[in-house]
Structures are given as structure tokens and as C-alpha cells.
Amino acid sequence: MAQAQLDAESNVLVPAGEEEDDSLASFPTREGWWTTFVLYHGCWLTPQAATSVSLVRAQFAPRPDDVLLATYPKCGTTWLKALSFAVTNRSSHPVVGACAGDHPLLTSHPQDLVPSIETPFRHLHPLSALDAIPSPRLLSTHLPHQLLPPRIVELGCRIVYLCREPKDVVVSTWHFMNKVGNGFFLDLDEAFELFVDGCSLYGPVWDHCLGYWKKSIQEPDTVLFLKYDDMMADPAGHVKKLAEFLRVPFTDDEVRAGVVDEVVRLCSFERLSSLPVNSSGVVDRIGGRPMENSSYFRKAKVGDWKNNLTEEMAQKLDAVIAEKLKGSGLTF
């Protein structure tokens, strides 16, 4: 299939042939945040991201034993990557004992230990890098369920989905975008209204959550649905649940030896954010947007929205979320 190309000057998608003219080039656009967004199959993306996603959907070759960590942006992605990496690799990289001091999480950013399928942008960085990773692969994505490469669903690849209270998401997103936007700054009121209207990167947030929520109910052995607030309240319990789902459950001996507690400690915000590899340096993990490693670590607090949103704003977002999720059984 012909692929759309990104025009460097206009920053919009240009079709490579008539087939693409009915898809990428014809999607609605909207100004907001830091650039024009494209409503790609019901999901708001930047033009570059839409091009990358198109390539991923067409070219990514999943394997039956792949595990995909899926999150809406600013919902604990870095934490989930760290926990999942530590849990799945603890036989080769122990978290307790003499070798614990050499653990990869102490010297590598969690974002780099679990690569994303759609970033760095695949029209700039081919998917062959993912093909070279030995099985079983631990991968990540911000894609909503309906935009996953079809073969992921067909093969029954396991998916861990982590969501977060939307009020905390919008505040965290606003802080993050203003920090990494290379001079971009958006007033909180503007960002909030865009978010409530459904226009945010990989949004609307309610559709993102609902897609994985419904699949987790239909196929609980394939999709594990987690909530950030619940994980923060009981990290050890959720690490055990994560290990069970990933088919590497903790043994009684491991539990008695404190392995679960050590995974929690190793992957804690306090521990990870203090490491030099995470607190200093600049890396371009997306494609054309270098960001400080520390930008992935802000507060990790539940309820921080109270320090930023007015009560009126909170009630407005709560009402929208309640309406969008009504009847699904999913609540925040």
C-alpha cells in the first residue's frame, strides 16, 4: 500500500497515491496545543505521528509471545515500563543479591528498556530495529486499541493497560508539554478546554480507556486493565498481579526473600528519578524533539490536580467523563 509522506514545509500529510488520498490526507485537522492535529480514525495525532502509525499498522510484524504495555500519555508509562522490565527479566537481572547493583534500571532509562512501536517516528526510523529484538519482546504503545496493528489482536498478544484519573492526566500533560515544547506554552485554561473537548494527543482520553476496558472484560487473559491510583495504593499487590499476567509469577521463596518489595523499591519514583541516567541528559526518543531525561519524572502524585484545577473545572471534566463512560462499568 502506498504510504503518505510528511511535507517538511507545510507539516501536513501528502498522499503518495490515490489510495492514501481517501485516508490520511482527507482526515479532519484542528489547531491547538503546539501544532496542527489530525483526527486519524477517531484519534487525535500530530501529522508526524499519524504517518508513523500508518506505517506501523501496515508493516509491524507482531509475534505471539509479544507483550505490549499500552498507556494514554502521562498515565504512568515510565513506571509501568520499569516494573514490567524488572518483573520479566528478574532471572537474568536479579533485584536482590550480589548482582542487583548491576541492574539495567540503574544505568538505562526505562523508556529505552521497553521500546515503543510507533516512536521514534517510523518514517524516520525503520521498524527493523524492533525486528532485531529477541523473543519474547516487551514493547510499548500509546495507541488506542482500535489503532493497534490488526495482527496484534489476531495473534492474541498480551496487553497490559494502565490508565489514570483524567484530572491528573490533563494537569500532567499540560506541565509536560510546556516543559518539552521548545518554546511552546499553552495556558492551562486553553489546554483544559481542548482536553475536555476530546482534542489531546492520542485522545479523546475516554475513548482510549474504553477501548482497552471493553477488551479486558471480553478477554481477561489477553488484556490486563490497571488503574494508576490503585497501583499507587498497593504497589506490591499489583506487582504480583502483573507477574501472574506476564506468566512469570513470584514463587513463595521469592516473596519471603523480599523480591516483590525490592521490585517496588527499585522502580519507585524516588529511586528512579534520583538516578543520573534519569535526572540528567537530553535524548530524542520521538524524532526531531530532543527532551531532557528528567522530563519523564515530575511528581507522580495522586490528586495533584487539586493544586492546578479549580473546582468548577474539576466538576466539568468529571461530568464529561461520567457521561462518556456511562453504562460501561468503568469509573474514576
Image (cartoon, rainbow, N blue to C red):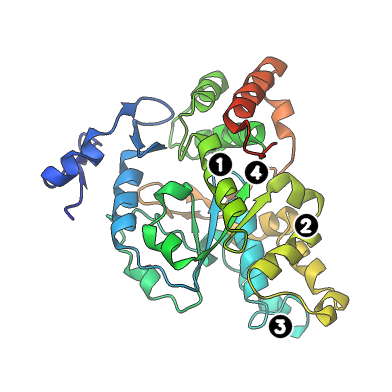
Confirm whether residue 279 shows in the render. Answer: no
Who is closer to the viewer here, 120 or 182?
Answer: 120
How crowded pointer 2 is (Cα within 10 Å; few <14, some 14-19, many 20+) is rated as many
Q: Residue type at mark 2: give it.
A: Pro
Give how far apart the Cα atoms at labels 3 and 2 are.
24 Å
Labels 4 & 3 near each other (Cβ < 8 A)? no
Who is closer to the viewer here, 285 or 87?
Answer: 87
The residue to which callout 3 is attached is 99
Q: Is residue 58 left or right of 4 when viewed as pictured?
A: right
Identity of the residue furthest to the top in this view: 312
Mark 1 vs mark 2: which is more N-terminal?
1
Tag in front: 2 or 4: 2
251 over 76 or under it: above or below: below
Which type of secondary structure does the marked residue at label 1 adopt? helix
Confirm whether residue 74 shows in the render. Answer: yes
Mark 3 vs mark 1: which is more N-terminal?
3
Task: Look at 62% across and 59% down and name the residue there.
Answer: 220
Who is closer to the viewer here, 281 or 145?
Answer: 145
Give how far apart the Cα atoms at labels 4 and 3 are.
29 Å
189 over 137 or under it: above or below: above
Q: Residue type at mark 1: give it.
A: Leu
How crowded pointer 3 is (Cα within 10 Å; few <14, some 14-19, many 20+) is rated as few
Tag in front: 3 or 1: 1
The residue to which callout 4 is attached is 298
Q: Is residue 182 left or right of 277 when viewed as pictured?
A: left
**Which corner quadrant holds the N terminus?**
bottom left
330 over 2 or under it: above or below: above
Tag in front: 3 or 2: 2
Q: Residue type at mark 3: give it.
A: Cys
Mark 3 vs mark 2: which is more N-terminal?
3
Identity of the residue furthest to the right in this view: 256
